[in-house]
Image (cartoon, helix red, strand yellow):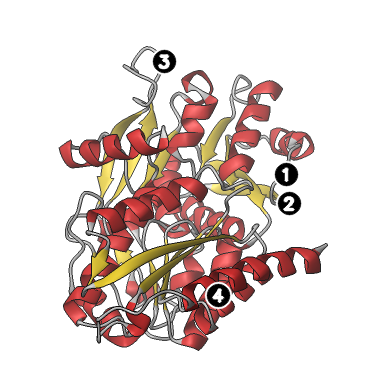
Amino acid sequence: MRTTLLAAALAVVWQGAAVAQQAPATTSQTVSDGVVRLGFLLDMSGPYADVTGPGSAAAARMAVEDAGGKVLGAPVEVVVADHQNKPDIAAATARAWFDTGRIDAILDVAASATALAAADIAKAKNKVIVFNGPGAVRLTNEACSPVSVHWAYDTYALANSTALATVKAGGDSWFFVTADYAFGQDLERDAGAVVKANGGKVLGGVRVPLNNADFSSFLLQAQGSGAKVIGLANAGADTTNAIKQAAEFGLTQGGQKLAGLLVYISDVHSLGLKATQGMLLTEGFYWDLNDETRAWSKRYFERVGKMPNMSQAGVYSTVMHYLKAVQKAGTDETSAVMRAMREMPVDDFYARGGRIREDGRMIHDMYLFEVKTPEESKGPWDLYKLVATVPGEQAFQPLSASRCPLVKK
């Protein structure tokens, strides 16, 4: 089955490469092959399809259109592939894109395990790769590279904001229900460290396979632990399934509190305010923050039919920044573009005064929200109230604690 899936994915890649090789040349002498091709390795049909997938692809195309469809006189193309949440498919697709598909940069890879696999290929091929969907902090630690950037959020920022606020509110004993792969493991580790550093205790945890439908046995273990807080170190459909089933088990009615360590606005919208009211969560973006976020999100909603989340808005921001860097560098050559990306601040509706650090972390403010009650909400997407703005320098892991070999101590 695995071989069949890999063959199918490669067939799509080779077909795309053949089309690319037939593309007409342009007069541009500064852009390789006369076209700037941007790749997106997304989950188009699995547990993260709703939080990345078609919505992230739409955000990328919006950015290209808003940039005029060209840079340095060369057309810009968006190429999307479904990695099916399989690291081997992600790696094989990235390699084929760079070797024969003439992809200049990969500007998102959904999920952490697949992102880590694609990052290795980008490093070996010396090609730009940026991450908005995955959260594993190791992308800017052990797996950092001169060509990679982590844009939207990471497990350290989520834990540093949500777990800290929850402990300070009295939730000082935790049990983790964790997605058993890179992202979930990093999120549990980072949140657990915050809990312990602030006088709390971690009473236990359980690892759950990705894309799991039945959380009953895991939630029973959490319930039996007696922990005040059940930390959900997962995302996408896994998170929504866990929250729904926790409500069915009466966990919150029994006095335990759920802490969704990565909850997207689409998750809250899907679950409803009755099930999620009062939940604390951390985001890097919210559509209703200010006039700029509202204006862009309205355009996105008209195209997609739902409000964007932080990863999808981050894709738009990433594409615009990359194209501005190509324009500034006067070429799409990797080292020149990366240098320009690091030199330019990120100033858009997504981030003000953002900057790309030497470990590849894009530093920007994060936001702690509380989910509104049904009575407080004024509409289907009026879901959050802002509790605190966490400055980027406080939200993300300090360089002094970095495990990235590029960081000079």
For this orientation, the residue located farthest to the right is 1
Real-space CA distance between mark 4 and mark 3, rounded to the nearest whole angstrom? 52 Å
The circle on residue 18 is 4
Position of 206 with respect to 263 (left or right) is right
Q: Determine the CA span between mark 1 and mark 2.
A: 6 Å
Label 2 sits on a secondary structure element that is loop
SS under mark 3? loop
The nearer-to-camera label among 4 and 1 is 4
Location of mark 3 (residue)? 374
Determine the CA span between mark 2 and mark 3: 33 Å
Taking depth in this image into account, of 29 and 277 the one nearest to the observer is 29
Tell me the quarter of the picture where residue 401 sits.
bottom left
Mark 3 and mark 2 in contact (Cβ < 8 Å)?
no
Mark 2 and mark 4: Cα distance apart in space = 37 Å
One can see residue 408 in this view = no
Q: Is residue 280 above or below residue 5?
A: above
